[in-house]
Image: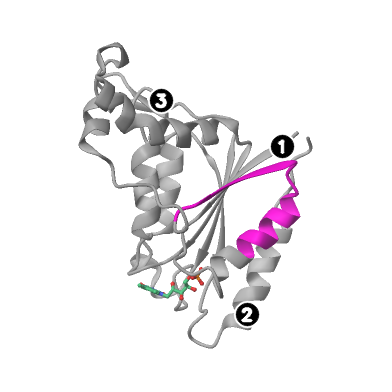
Amino acid sequence: MTTLLRIDASSRHEGSYSRRFGDELIAHLSPTRTLTRDLVHTPVPHLPVGAISAFFSDESTWSQSQRTATEISEQLLSEITAADDIVITTPMYNFGIPSALKAWIDHIVRVGKTFSFDGKRFAGLVSNKRVFIVVAYGADGYTKGELKAADFVVPYLQFIFNFIGIDDVTIIPVEGMNVGLAELAESRARAAISAVSPRTA
Ligand SMILES: Cc1cc2nc3c(=O)[nH]c(=O)nc-3n(C[C@H](O)[C@H](O)[C@H](O)COP(=O)(O)O)c2cc1C
């Protein structure tokens, strides 16, 4: 059995390219089970102060309010633990990720849970998972062209997943959707999807 965790971040439900190619990628991967977390339909809150104090203290000392404040983080982490593959679908908004996705990241990057720190070095604690990032851009030129330096989506997400221990990160760019390149972008995205290997149970 393979479990896939899907995280959606586009504010658009209708007409979203990142969601559409996410659908195509997941059909190609054909997992046994898909857990979906739509960060726009059901947003996760910005990190509450009680969660911050809890994340950096011993769980045995937590107050009831700290426990309550970490519930959503615990839920999101359990979804990651359950997943073999994780698919993130996201637009570029103002050269970076949407704040809905950043809020999710703030709940799942946790010392002692997804990374460790021994006073000198950080180490990722999440292993044996693949991440796929379907990213839709309005303009063209982020993957190879002159806007490469302005892409704070892919380098950031790649770094975050590597940081928590996931090295197997595949990017499916859907680039140039608002500048008349949709057809080319779609064929490139489909080629990238067909190059992905589905998991063998
Ligand atoms: C608030 C906002 C900011 C955007 N910023 C950028 C940007 O910085 N660079 C870019 O190429 N496209 C930008 N776009 C265009 C989107 O990335 C593009 O429409 C993409 O297809 C949106 O993803 P979706 O189709 O999954 O909704 C922006 C769109 C919105 C709504």
Residue at point 54% right, 88% down? 180
| Element assignment for label 1 | loop
Q: Is residue 80 above or below residue 153?
A: above
Q: Nearer the viewer, mark 2 or mark 1?
A: 1
**Which dot marks residue 2?**
1
Q: Residues within 10 Å of mark 3 (few under 14, many from 20)?
A: some
Q: Is residue 79 left or right of residue 145?
A: right
- The C terminus lies in quadrant: top right
| Element assignment for label 3 | loop
Residue at point 73% right, 56% down? 27
Q: Is residue 179 above or below residue 100?
A: below
Q: Is residue 111 left or right of residue 33?
A: left
Which comes sooner in the sequence, label 3 or label 1?
1
Q: Which residues are magenta?
A: 21-39
Which comes sooner in the sequence, label 3 or label 2?
3
**Which dot marks residue 184?**
2
Residue that carries the numbered disc 3 in the rendered image: 113
**Distance between the alpha carbons at the discs numbered 3 and 2:** 41 Å
Q: Is residue 107 left or right of residue 144?
A: left
Which comes sooner in the sequence, label 2 or label 1?
1
**Distance between the alpha carbons at the discs numbered 2 and 1:** 32 Å
Q: Residues within 10 Å of mark 1 (few under 14, many from 20)?
A: some
Q: Where residue 110 appears, x then y in whole percent?
A: 35, 31
* Residue 15 on the magenta span: no
Specify the amino acid type for callout 3.
Answer: Lys
* Residue 22 on the magenta span: yes
Residue at point 37% right, 36% down? 109
Q: Where residue 57 appears, x then y in whole percent?
A: 24, 19
Give 166 or 94, whichever is nearer the viewer. 94
